Image (tube, rainbow, N blue to C red):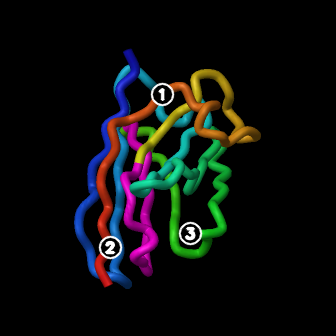
Amino acid sequence: QVQLVETGGGSVQAGGSLRLSCAASRYTVGNTCMGWFRQAPGKEREGVAYIASNGGATYADSVKGRATISQDNGKNTLYLQMGSLKADDTAMYYCAAKSLYRACYYTSASSFAYWGQGTQVTVSS
């Protein structure tokens, strides 16, 4: 079955940066819409960034200007580069992929079929 494996999380000081990676197997990065979500303790899972198969990207207002989502088809990997990190960015970060749709018209978590196990990002002030 499809496997998505996130890496790159860790502890970082406020103002720092991280690059999260999501390596896919039995799934071709770029075939469908993919996204990064995050969930902080006691909060609902929220979308952070999405990328369509044509490379078009959209971002949550909370990370706009600080995050870049990208995909490397050769490495079959999705990335999320985040900078100017804040304590509010502390969460478990998940990558996700749709099973069918190339565009990201719908971005609710329930519209994504495949999920990774998550990588923890902790930002200390």
Q: What's the residue type where badge 3 is placed? A: Val
Residue 95 quadrant: top left
Pointers 2 and 1 in contact (CB under 8 A)?
A: no
Q: Nearer the viewer, mark 2 or mark 1?
A: 2
Residue to which mark 1 is pinned: 114
**Spot occupied by residue 46 in the image (x, y as percentages of width and height):** 56, 52
Q: Is residue 13 left or right of residue 105?
A: left
Q: Earlier in the sequence, mark 3 or mark 1?
A: 3
Disc 2 on helix, strand or loop? strand
Magenta span covers which residues?
76-93
For this rendering, which residue is in front, 21 or 106? 106
Label annotation for residue 123: 2
Distance in Å between CA atoms under marks 2 and 1: 27 Å
**Spot occupied by residue 55 in the image (x, y as percentages of width and height):** 62, 48
Disc 3 on helix, strand or loop? loop
Residue to which mark 3 is pinned: 63
**Spot occupied by residue 8 in the image (x, y as percentages of width and height):** 27, 56
Q: Is residue 21 on the magenta stretch? A: no
Please identify the quadrant where the N terminus is shown: top left
